[in-house]
Image (cartoon, grey):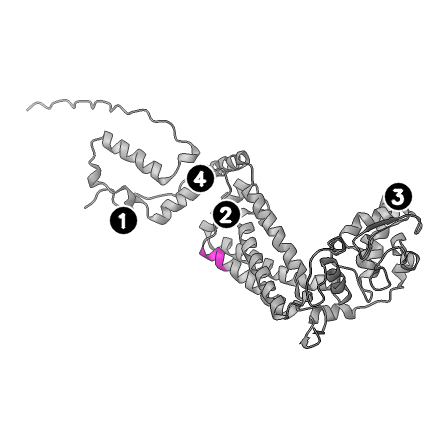
């Protein structure tokens, strides 16, 4: 019987479909494209289970690897939220047990409140106000007796929160300028900015003036009254509010707090709660990336999108930091309440870090859409270069395409 030659199959005409972009590379797009190809080949879709090829976790992983959008993703999973909560609670615990208040005090004449053991130790490391460093690096804004009559509130114990040169932060600029011109800049008890000239020798060289400034701050840091916390002197401008039993303004409250030990040494103590939260967060971030390969890949892609080279710049870390420091700040509100409204219980360092976390999170959300799209393009390209996971179709565990 003669054998009939095989009849060549006619090529199947396919409708031209637009080439998918990086924004289209999700599982739903892949599924729709596959169904179109199967229909063209006469396959009954009712007998096919495409979704059985990948489980939901794999689908989610594919969508995470190839994504687009106009904003940076700061979504936190359950483990992230738990870590942020733990970090906030640890910071709050440190605030209650270590930071406390600067010193032992009987508040409102009836509430005995214990001060911080760490601040007590720092205050014990005391040097005389006329130490050798102070004698060598005299500055023009330290002439208390010479100007006390011209600036209200100035005195031997209180002149440092009033003179901007003594502020560890503001003084780096204002104090250096005062030294260069041989003058003094201060804020009076009434909130008036006073600028005086000819109060001391001038050092016109900016480098010399800056060295003098740093050395003088160092000489005052461990004297009996210490230095005010960074930026604290600016609070003398806020002649508003009515707080506490004496209805003090913000400026009066700041002055009262400094005179009761709320200085730069206690600021170091307050920073321990911030450091505790950061240690927990960064430890979790590092450990999870080491133990969870999928999480590490997600973080690497997100870092590529955001252009983040450091942990603190990562969008997801910033969201976690905001949650952690918001929790710590809320606990500090509770601490002030426990201390009967004593303003000395306010954790200034913790609130600064909270507002810093808010600012950095807003920066993430306000990122330019064009920058975000470029970041997504870089990340998707990196994912494509890494390639897909290898799949062995001969493996007995490989899912079946057709329903049995």
Q: Of the residues under marks 3 and 2, which one precedes in the sequence? A: 2
Q: Residues within 10 Å of mark 3 (few under 14, many from 20)?
A: few
Pointer 4 residue: 67
Query: How far apart, in angstroms, are the residues tagged by discs 4 and 1?
Result: 31 Å
Q: Is residue 394 visible?
A: no
Residue nearer the viewer, 98 or 260 = 260
- In this view, 143 is above or below 3: below
Q: Which mark is residue 396?
A: 1
Pointer 2 residue: 74
Q: Of the residues under marks 4 and 3, which one precedes in the sequence? A: 4
Question: Which portion, as a residue range, is magenta?
Answer: 78-82
- In this view, 101 is above or below 297: below
Q: Secondary structure at mark 4?
A: loop
> Do tag 4 and tag 1 residues touch (Cβ < 8 Å)?
no
- In this view, 379 is above or below 131: above
Query: How far apart, in angstroms, are the residues tagged by discs 1 and 3?
Result: 80 Å
Q: Of the residues under marks 2 and 1, which one precedes in the sequence? A: 2
Q: Residues within 10 Å of mark 1 (few under 14, many from 20)?
A: few
Q: Quadrant of the rendered structure where residue 22 is?
A: top left
Q: Of the residues under marks 4 and 1, which one precedes in the sequence? A: 4
Residue at 56% from the left image edge and 44% from the top image edge = 364
Q: Quadrant of the N terminus?
A: top left
Q: Does 79 lie within the magenta span?
A: yes
Q: Secondary structure at mark 1?
A: loop
Q: How many marks?
A: 4
Query: How far apart, in angstroms, are the residues tagged by discs 4 and 2?
Result: 14 Å
Left or right of residue 214, residue 350 in this image: left
**Coordinates of residue 168 in the picture (x, y in percent):** 77, 55
> Do tag 1 and tag 3 residues touch (Cβ < 8 Å)?
no
Residue at 67% from the left image edge and 58% from the top image edge = 349
Q: Which mark is residue 205?
A: 3
């Amino acid at each position: 019987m003669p054998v009939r030659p095989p009849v060549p199959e006619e090529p199947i005409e396919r409708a031209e479909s637009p080439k998918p972009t990086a924004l289209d590379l999700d599982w739903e797009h892949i599924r729709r494209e596959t169904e179109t190809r199967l229909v063209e080949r006469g396959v009954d879709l009712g007998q096919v289970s495409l979704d059985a090829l990948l489980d939901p976790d794999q689908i989610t992983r594919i969508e995470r690897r190839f994504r687009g959008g106009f904003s940076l993703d700061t979504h936190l999973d359950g483990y992230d939220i738990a870590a942020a909560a733990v970090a906030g609670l640890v910071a709050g615990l440190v605030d209650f047990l270590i930071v406390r208040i600067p010193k032992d005090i009987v508040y409102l004449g009836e509430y005995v409140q214990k001060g911080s053991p760490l601040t007590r130790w720092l205050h014990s490391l005391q040097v005389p106000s006329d130490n050798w460093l102070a004698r060598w690096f005299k500055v023009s804004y330290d002439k208390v007796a010479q100007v006390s009559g011209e600036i209200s509130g100035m005195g031997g114990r209180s002149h440092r929160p009033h003179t901007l040169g003594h502020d560890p932060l503001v003084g780096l600029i204002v104090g250096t300028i005062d030294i260069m011109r041989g003058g003094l800049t201060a804020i009076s008890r009434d909130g008036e900015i006073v600028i005086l000239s000819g109060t001391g020798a001038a050092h016109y060289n900016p480098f010399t003036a800056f060295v003098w400034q740093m050395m003088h701050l160092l000489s005052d840091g461990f004297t009996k009254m210490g230095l005010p916390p960074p930026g604290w002197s600016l609070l003398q401008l806020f002649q508003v509010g009515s707080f506490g039993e004496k209805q003090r303004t913000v400026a009066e409250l700041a002055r009262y707090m400094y005179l009761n030990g709320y200085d730069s040494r206690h600021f170091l103590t307050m920073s321990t709660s911030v450091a505790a939260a950061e240690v927990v967060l960064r430890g979790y971030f590092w450990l999870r990336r080491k133990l969870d390969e999928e999480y590490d890949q997600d973080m690497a892609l997100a870092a590529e999108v955001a252009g983040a080279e450091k942990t603190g710049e990562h969008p997801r870390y910033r969201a976690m930091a905001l949650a952690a420091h918001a929790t710590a700040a809320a606990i500090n509100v509770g601490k002030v309440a426990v201390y009967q409204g004593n303003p000395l219980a306010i954790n200034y360092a913790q609130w600064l870090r909270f507002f810093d976390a808010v600012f950095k999170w807003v920066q993430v959300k306000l990122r330019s859409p064009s920058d975000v799209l470029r970041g997504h393009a870089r990340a998707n390209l990196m994912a494509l270069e890494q390639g897909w996971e290898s799949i062995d179709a001969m493996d007995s565990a490989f899912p079946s395409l057709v329903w049995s």
